[in-house]
Image (cartoon, rainbow, N blue to C red):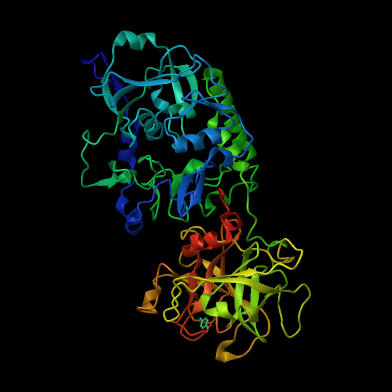
């Protein structure tokens, strides 16, 4: 309540503070993964988040695209430097390279239209009541407090040149009463949080409701606040209250408070990749988690129909009510961004043409059926099948470095679609190797970097490698796509326990094992290797399976090549799990050799 003895002061209500008091009493620090914080992840790290459509993921970082690399279709937009762009994506990629050219409005540039934002009635330049003039509005207006949160405040402060965004959305600002009584309408604003200017957010106009007030902000400046013991240090240097980390809200502005989470509190959802996203982003038709888990198990479950009919009716009525009392003033650039995203090229990998096949039976494995493992290949050296391999697209096969030697290139044959080499099945194709690339840091003594690429030879007059029934497995671009205890599948033509020969492709289910150094002290290298197996050791890779796949499926049943069979102490023994090359660690190495377009699923 506004105190009676200060009639000229407008109290800007601090809704966030109220939320703070209601926060649960579980220790917020427990939710944060300290080890992960060392990596200093932000919204620019594609191991944790998707890049924007005007960026590409290169070496784990979101890098600016060049405008011509954007999809061509879209709406014309105007930037603050007076230039118009064919699409929002082109403007954003240009701005990504030249930050002074910000978004101004949707549509062509006009002579008169300018946007203005200023802070009024604060004690410093960095704080005050937010006043804006929209491009095609004549008058300056205030922002309704009930639409104001740290998300919009961060954008406003960034727009004003405060790189680290907002410190607080609270503030007691002295405000002339006559001005307050003459203003009858305020602007409601909604941002996503990635915007660099408030003009990219959606504005609607409505009557001022005096109880709810108008918005103010304190932008973050280094000398304005000192961090306390219980603050969370954002990667951009801004301290925020510890209980604002892992709540799904991007308080930092660079998202660094939401990317290293073991759990989420408040109204948020935990992605399997350890990222907290706002609850309203779950089942909204757009994938936010790199692991895809925010868009599964949604009611109706089809991408078009994500909300139930009754919920839709309810929302429709709410929207109708809103339209009656408000006026929409700006274009919806978030919808434009989604539209652009849908136009980006998509890579097809990791999906079997026949759909899901029968699940059930390497050591302890069961025989594969046609089409079960369309990415599996067998490497034949002279007259014996010596190793496995994985088709990843184009003319490229991934295998273990210890399986091949460059000097023996003429002695290898790569067999695709092979199920049984005693009774060969139909559809088998045999390929010679054109090139073998062994990882430059492969160590034959420790098996570090046990990874190699084989380029298949094209037949004369052919433009591709003719692998009719072979499907590429997806190459993982992030080490956060799968986690210990996830169930994955190994397959191969290798030996059974007791070194018994097998003639057919076998497979078995294993789980990813954490802390593998305890089984192989001094021999297991976390960054480059993964362990997988079963508790009793009953399912394992063995001699002859080397170079073959350990694959895992994501939330949308896309198959990723998570590991390459590398080594292990014996086969099928408890406490000696199989060790695999951690493919996610080699995404950049692979893309360097095969070309980004062949394996990049997002933002090529
Ligand atoms: C091998 O000799 C081999 N149990 C491959 C995998 C494992 C052991 C040996 C894992 O190629």
Q: Hey, which quadrant is residue 286 in on the image?
A: top right
Query: Is residue 34 or residue 104 the one in the foreground?
Result: 104
Residue occupying the far right of the picture: 426
Query: Is residue 63 or residue 504 the one in the foreground?
Result: 63
Query: Is residue 12 or residue 523 the one in the foreground?
Result: 523
Quarter of the image that includes the N terminus: top left
Residue 74 to residue 536: above or below: above
Residue drawn at the location 48% of the way across and 85% of the way down:
573
Query: Is residue 601 or residue 193 the one in the foreground?
Result: 601
* Residue 545 seen in the figure: no
594 sits to left or right of 418 = left
Q: Hey, which quadrant is residue 395 in on the image?
A: bottom right
Q: Position of residue 54 (x, y in %)?
A: 52, 40
Q: Position of residue 581 (x, y in %)?
A: 49, 71
Q: Position of residue 102 (x, y in %)?
A: 45, 29
Residue 533 to residue 560: above or below: below
Residue drawn at the location 52% of the way across and 84% of the way down:
572
221 sits to left or right of 289 = left
126 sits to left or right of 502 = left
Residue 222 to residue 440: above or below: above
Residue drawn at the location 24% of the way across and 16% of the way down:
4
Q: Position of residue 377 (x, y in %)?
A: 65, 73
Image mark count? 0
* Residue 459 seen in the figure: yes
Residue 565 to residue 107: above or below: below
């Amino acid at each position: 309540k506004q105190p009676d003895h200060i009639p000229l002061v407008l109290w800007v209500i601090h809704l966030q503070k109220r939320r703070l008091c209601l926060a649960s009493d579980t220790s917020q620090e427990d939710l944060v993964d300290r080890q992960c914080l060392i990596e200093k992840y932000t919204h620019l790290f594609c191991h944790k988040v998707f890049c924007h459509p005007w960026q590409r993921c290169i070496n784990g970082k979101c890098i600016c695209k060049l405008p011509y690399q954007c999809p061509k279709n879209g709406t014309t937009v105007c930037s603050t430097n007076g230039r118009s762009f064919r699409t929002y994506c082109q403007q954003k990629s240009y701005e990504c390279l030249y930050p002074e050219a910000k978004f101004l409005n949707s549509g062509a540039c006009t002579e008169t239209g300018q946007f203005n934002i200023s802070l009024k009635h604060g004690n410093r330049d960095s704080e005050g009541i937010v006043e804006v003039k929209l491009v095609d509005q004549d008058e300056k207006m205030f922002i309704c407090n009930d639409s104001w949160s740290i998300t919009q405040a961060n954008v406003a402060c960034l727009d004003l040149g405060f790189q680290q965004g907002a410190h607080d959305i609270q503030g007691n600002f002295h405000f002339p009463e006559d001005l307050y009584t003459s203003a009858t309408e305020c602007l409601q604003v909604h941002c996503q949080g990635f915007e660099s200017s408030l003009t990219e957010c959606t504005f609607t106009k409505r009557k001022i409701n005096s109880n709810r007030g108008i918005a103010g902000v304190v932008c973050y400046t280094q000398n304005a606040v000192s961090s306390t013991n219980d603050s969370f240090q954002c990667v951009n240097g801004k301290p925020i209250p510890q209980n604002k980390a892992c709540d799904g809200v991007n308080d930092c502005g660079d998202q660094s408070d939401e990317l290293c989470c073991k759990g989420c509190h408040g109204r948020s959802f935990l992605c399997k990749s350890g990222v907290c996203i706002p609850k309203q982003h779950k089942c909204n038709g757009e994938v936010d988690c790199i692991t895809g888990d925010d868009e599964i198990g949604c009611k109706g479950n089809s991408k078009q129909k994500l909300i139930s009919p009754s919920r839709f009716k309810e929302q429709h009525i709410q929207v109708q009510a809103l339209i009656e009392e408000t006026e929409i003033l700006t274009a919806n650039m978030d919808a434009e961004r989604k539209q652009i995203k849908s136009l980006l090229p998509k890579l097809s990998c990791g999906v079997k043409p026949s759909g899901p096949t029968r699940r059930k039976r390497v050591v302890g494995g069961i025989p594969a059926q046609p089409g079960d493992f369309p990415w599996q290949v067998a490497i034949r050296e002279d007259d014996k099948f010596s190793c496995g391999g994985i088709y990843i697209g184009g003319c490229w096969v991934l295998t273990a470095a210890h399986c091949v030697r460059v000097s023996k290139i003429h002695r290898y044959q790569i067999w695709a679609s092979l199920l049984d080499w005693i009774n060969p099945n139909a559809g088998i194709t045999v390929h010679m190797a054109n090139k073998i690339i062994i990882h430059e840091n492969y160590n034959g003594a420790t098996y570090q970097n046990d990874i190699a690429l084989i380029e298949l030879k094209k037949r004369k007059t052919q433009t591709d490698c003719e692998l009719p029934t072979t499907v590429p497995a997806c190459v993982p671009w992030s080490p956060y796509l799968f986690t210990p205890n996830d169930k994955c599948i190994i397959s191969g033509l290798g030996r059974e326990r007791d070194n018994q020969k097998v003639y057919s492709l076998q497979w078995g289910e294993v789980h990813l094992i954490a802390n593998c150094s305890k089984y192989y002290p001094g021999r297991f290298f976390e960054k480059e290797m993964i362990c997988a197996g079963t508790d009793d050791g009953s399912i394992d890779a063995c001699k002859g399976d080397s170079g073959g796949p350990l694959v895992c499926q994501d939330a949308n049943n896309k198959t990723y090549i998570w590991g390459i069979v590398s080594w292990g102490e014996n086969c099928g023994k408890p406490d000696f799990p199989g060790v695999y090359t951690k493919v996610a660690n080699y995404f950049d190495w692979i893309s360097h050799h095969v070309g980004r377009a062949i394996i990049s699923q997002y933002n090529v």
